[in-house]
Image (cartoon, grey):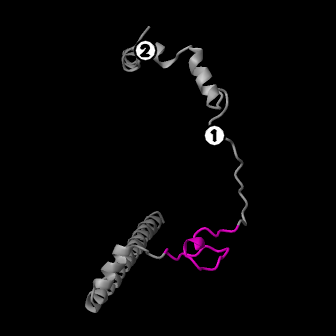
């Protein structure tokens, strides 16, 4: 018995004859190109999962840097000519304003994060205090 979903799928799919051809010409064409229909497309290579493998990928990005087994958090240098030209065209006041705004924004983010943590701690302490008062009142009432 066919459901409505099965009927809808048959309408969306092209006819089977266009998907699968039994012609030997296609198989011969694939074999001529150096492939086999039964070979996997990707070779399987085992992954080396050593724990103490040296990590020297990010340090190679900066020319002339020393290779170190510990990856640092240094960012790559910006080597964009348009960016460098834009910075060269700015005056001293514009650069100082940019640095000041950058650090002000960092201070604002830190203040907001600290305030969120402080008020979360305050709320948890108040809820714990209310719970303590309620439980102690219930214990004294059943005395």
Residue at left offset 63%, top offset 40%: 42
Residue 115 can be seen, yes or no: no
The circle drawn on residue 15 is: 2
Mark 1: secondary structure: loop
Q: Residues within 10 Å of mark 2 (few under 14, many from 20)?
A: few
Q: Between 11 and 104, which is closer to the camera in this rendering? A: 11
Residue 29, image x and y in percent? 59, 24
State the CA–CA distance, disc 2 to disc 1.
30 Å
Mark 2: secondary structure: loop
Q: Between 47 and 38, which is closer to the camera in this rendering? A: 38
Above or below: residue 62 compared with residue 5:
below
Above or below: residue 36 compared with residue 62:
above
62 falls in the magenta region: yes
Residue 16, image x and y in percent? 47, 14
Q: Between 129 and 57, which is closer to the camera in this rendering? A: 57
The residue lying furthest to the front in this view is 32
Residue 55 can be seen, yes or no: yes
Residue 60, image x and y in percent? 59, 71
Sequence-earlier tag: 2 or 1: 2
Q: Quadrant of residue 1?
A: top left
Residue 39, image x and y in percent? 67, 31
Q: Which residue is mark 1?
A: 42
Provide the residue span drawn in magenta: 54-76
Residue at left offset 44%, top offset 64%: 138
**Contact (Cβ within 8 Å) of mark 2 with mark 1:** no
Residue at left offset 42%, top offset 70%: 124
The residue lying furthest to the bottom in this view is 92
Residue at left offset 35%, top offset 84%: 103
The circle drawn on residue 26 is: none
Above or below: residue 75 compared with residue 31:
below
């Amino acid at each position: 018995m066919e459901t409505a979903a099965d009927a809808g799928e048959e309408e969306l799919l092209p006819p089977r004859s266009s998907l699968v051809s039994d012609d030997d010409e296609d198989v011969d064409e694939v074999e001529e190109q150096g492939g086999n229909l039964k070979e996997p497309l990707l070779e399987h290579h085992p992954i080396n999962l050593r724990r103490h493998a040296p990590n020297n990928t990010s340090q190679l990005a900066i020319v002339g840097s020393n290779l170190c087994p510990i990856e640092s958090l240094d960012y790559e240098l910006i080597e964009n000519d348009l960016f460098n030209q834009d910075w060269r065209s700015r005056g001293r006041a514009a650069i100082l304003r940019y640095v000041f705004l950058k650090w002000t924004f960092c201070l604002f983010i830190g203040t907001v994060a600290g305030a969120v943590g402080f008020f979360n701690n305050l709320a948890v302490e108040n809820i714990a205090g209310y719970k303590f008062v309620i439980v102690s009142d219930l214990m004294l009432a059943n005395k």
